[in-house]
Amino acid sequence: MNKRIAITGFGVKVPNGENNNDLLDHLISGEYDFTARNDITPNQEPLWVGEVLGDLGTLEDKQYRVLPRISKLAISTSAEALAMAGLDLTDPGNKTGVFFGTTMGGTTPLEDMVHYASAGKFREMPVYCCGLVHYHSLASSISSFFHLTGISKTVTTGCTAGLEALEDAMLYLQSGKINTAIVGAADSSNNKVTVYGFGKIRALPFNQEIWNSGSPFNKKSKGFILSEGAASLILETEEHALSRNATIYGYVDAVSTNNDAESVNGQDKTGRNMKQAVNDVLGNRRPDYFNSQALGYDANDRIEDIVSRDIFQHEVPLTSIKGLIGHPFSVSGLAQIIASLLGFQHHFIPGTIRTDQHGYEHLPLITKTLPKATSEVLITSHGYGGNNACVYLTKQ
């Protein structure tokens, strides 16, 4: 039986969107704020980054020092999503799984641990050091915090990891092994290791003005804006959601993932496999628009242009929220979903800010918030090693 999978809650914490209401306000207004940092660049050049600036409340207390920042961000967004869903995790009728994705894991605390180890500072190394750097600390911290003893998985593929965690959850929900799932992603890697690595492939815009940094569909953009954050969804089988009279905010109608099979350091420039993933979720349908991963990095943006041309003949509008939130790696696809869910609720399509479309003037790009009721949206995402992921989201 093909069970419909409903979204009954969501939570977010990204730059210019530190909860659902904050993200809604910024999506509508287009106002943004990024931070110029020179303490993590090779030659103290300024680099624009996106930071979550808000307080994490009790998660900042001493008892949670054993958790990496990604776990704290994820717990925060999961709590917001659970409150929205009104889901009682203690109800024995709920069979809940936890599925989270991350690209860089605990890279930031790993820098500190490597420093201690290389300097021979064994005494200074915290006893909980392994938990700070282990990728699975992400999903396991959610399970521990909310006292969930069922399935707990962390997906670590790359920037598509959040959507691939979603895909895994869908399979478990469809199989009947679970009837509810907390699905999410978190990354926090505004550090030297990440900056040096992406700087080597010229994906980060050192010493550039904000308009040439992470500007989607703009050939003058010199790379993406590195950012941090987390996002969470509550998924339920439609039957389970209706049985408890839950509000349904949308449905994950289809998910498709594949790999370009080209290189761990590159992707298929023809966009062939991304187009296949898109066609897999589309069937014979056309969305009201598609929420693109385009992030101001030409290698990715060109493939999104190919999708628009070859599948939609440049006739379906598209947008990207990366000019607002930067690129929080694994979080990006789920943040795109949440932006579209907010659009369903409040009848608008978010605009692509901070771009003049240089070199992409032919695209039907939405550059300002567009008041419009929508009910079907395509989500696209690219990841490390050539992974592609697409989601088809519906309102009803």
Image (spheres, rainbow, N blue to C red):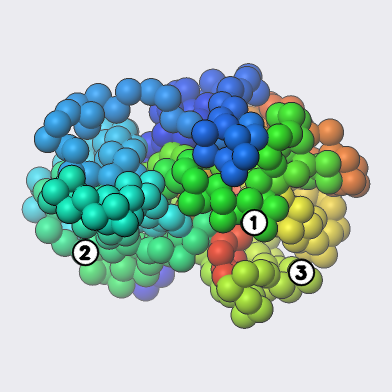
Q: Nearer the viewer, mark 3 or mark 2?
A: 3
The front one of 373 and 365 is 365
Question: For the residue marked with disc 1, what is the amino acid?
Answer: Lys
Residue 102 location in percent, x, y?
A: 41, 55
Q: Residues within 10 Å of mark 3 (few under 14, many from 20)?
A: some
Q: Nearer the viewer, mark 2 or mark 1?
A: 1
Residue 311 location in percent, x, y?
A: 78, 63
Q: Is residue 377 left or right of residue 353?
A: left
Dot 3 lies on which element? Answer: loop
The front one of 214 and 280 is 214
Among numbered discs 2 and 1, the one appearing first in the sequence = 2
- The residue under label 2 is 151
Q: Can residue 226 be spotted in the picture?
A: yes
Q: Nearer the viewer, mark 1 or mark 3?
A: 1
Pointers 1 and 3 in contact (CB under 8 A)? no
Pointers 3 and 2 in contact (CB under 8 A)? no
- The residue under label 1 is 200
Q: Is residue 344 left or right of residue 201?
A: left
Q: Residues within 10 Å of mark 2 (few under 14, many from 20)?
A: some
The front one of 85 and 113 is 113
Dot 2 lies on which element? Answer: loop
Q: Residue at x 23, y 69 (%)?
A: 177
The front one of 376 and 297 is 297
Among numbered discs 3 and 2, the one appearing first in the sequence = 2
The disc at residue 269 is: 3
Q: Is residue 58 left or right of residue 133?
A: left
Question: For the residue marked with disc 2, what is the amino acid?
Answer: Ile
Residue 168 location in percent, x, y?
A: 38, 66
